[in-house]
């Protein structure tokens, strides 16, 4: 039987999470919620690998699978802490129809839609996602840039994405396939601002997929540069 502790909060690397337990590395996660009361929130990554299968089971409210996967991950050595939360407080967002011009469409293998088989977003809707910042060099700009936006994995969780990759499409019809694992292994940003200025179509906006290139040497490989889609307009989950 799993037990809950209160209150719900984020826990970072090195913080205490229970009786003498700590999150010691980017390979550890924090799980929010309690079983079997079905008061589950979501999996929170401390900066690295996120067990996507477990996160999807929570999003789908599949409590038997959640319990099984939690046990497997805990047995594998993941440092975890159960934190109480109610269904009303667990961070689920309704997906209303856009009231302003649509800037992004997500389709494919998703469970939450607002326009037929797709999820359409205007700029205002995307502001409801938690804001993150990223300081990194790019292969197409000079020096170090300061980006602001939201995590791509947060957006995919919102629409209930379930697949192995996304096909990203740009305003100029540029298309590239990106493994979903990228978004759970790294804090990949959908940038809306660069150096304090809102991105526009004239300068790679309004949405630009940005990797933490300066933080990970492997991301400086040209294979990842192709995944920096600017003027992003669509994502198809496969």
Image (cartoon, grey):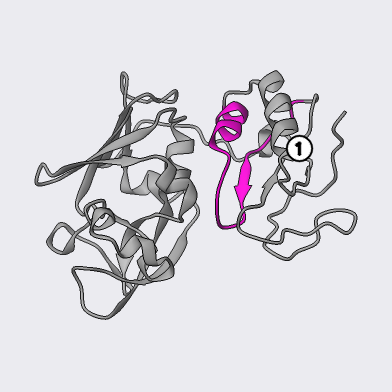
Location of the N terminus by quadrant is: top right
Location of the C terminus by quadrant is: top left
Residue at image coords 87%, 36%:
3
Q: Secondary structure at mark 1?
A: helix
User: In front: 113, or 69?
Assistant: 69
Residue at image coords 39%, 32%:
164
Q: How many marks can you see? A: 1
Is 110 left or right of 120, judged from the image as shown? right
Which percent across, then down, holds residue 7? 80, 49
Which percent across, then down, holds residue 92? 57, 35
Magenta-highlighted residues: 38-59
Residue at image coords 85%, 33%:
2
Category of crowding for the residue at label 1, using alpha-carbon neighbours closer than 10 angstroms: few (below 14), some (14–19), many (at least 20): few
User: Residue 59 occupies which quadrant of the picture?
Assistant: top right
Is 220 left or right of 139, judged from the image as shown? right
Residue on which the image places disc 1: 75
Give the vertical position of 20 relative to 4 (above or below): below
- Residue 190 on the magenta segment: no
User: In front: 40, or 218?
Assistant: 218
């Amino acid at each position: 039987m799993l037990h809950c502790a209160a209150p719900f909060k984020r826990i970072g690397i090195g913080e205490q999470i229970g009786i003498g337990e700590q999150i010691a590395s980017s390979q550890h996660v924090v799980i929010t919620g309690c079983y079997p009361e079905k008061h589950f929130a979501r999996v929170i990554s401390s900066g690295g690998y996120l067990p996507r299968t477990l996160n999807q089971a929570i999003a789908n409210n599949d409590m038997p699978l959640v319990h099984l996967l939690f046990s497997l991950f805990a047995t594998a050595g993941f440092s975890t802490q159960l934190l109480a939360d109610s269904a009303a407080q667990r961070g689920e967002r309704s997906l209303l129809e856009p009231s302003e011009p649509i800037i992004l469409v997500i389709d494919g293998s998703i469970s939450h839609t607002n326009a037929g088989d797709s999820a359409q977003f205007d700029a205002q809707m995307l502001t409801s996602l938690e804001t993150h910042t990223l300081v990194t060099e790019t292969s197409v700009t000079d020096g170090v840039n300061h980006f602001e936006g939201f995590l791509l994995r947060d957006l995919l969780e919102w629409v209930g994405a379930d697949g192995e990759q996304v096909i990203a499409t740009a305003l100029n019809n540029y298309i590239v396939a990106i493994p979903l694992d990228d978004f759970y292994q790294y804090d990949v940003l959908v940038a809306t601002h660069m150096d304090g200025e809102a991105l526009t179509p004239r300068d790679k906006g309004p949405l630009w997929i940005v990797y933490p290139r300066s933080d990970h040497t492997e991301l400086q490989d040209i294979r990842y540069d192709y995944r920096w889609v600017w003027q992003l307009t669509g994502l198809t989950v496969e």
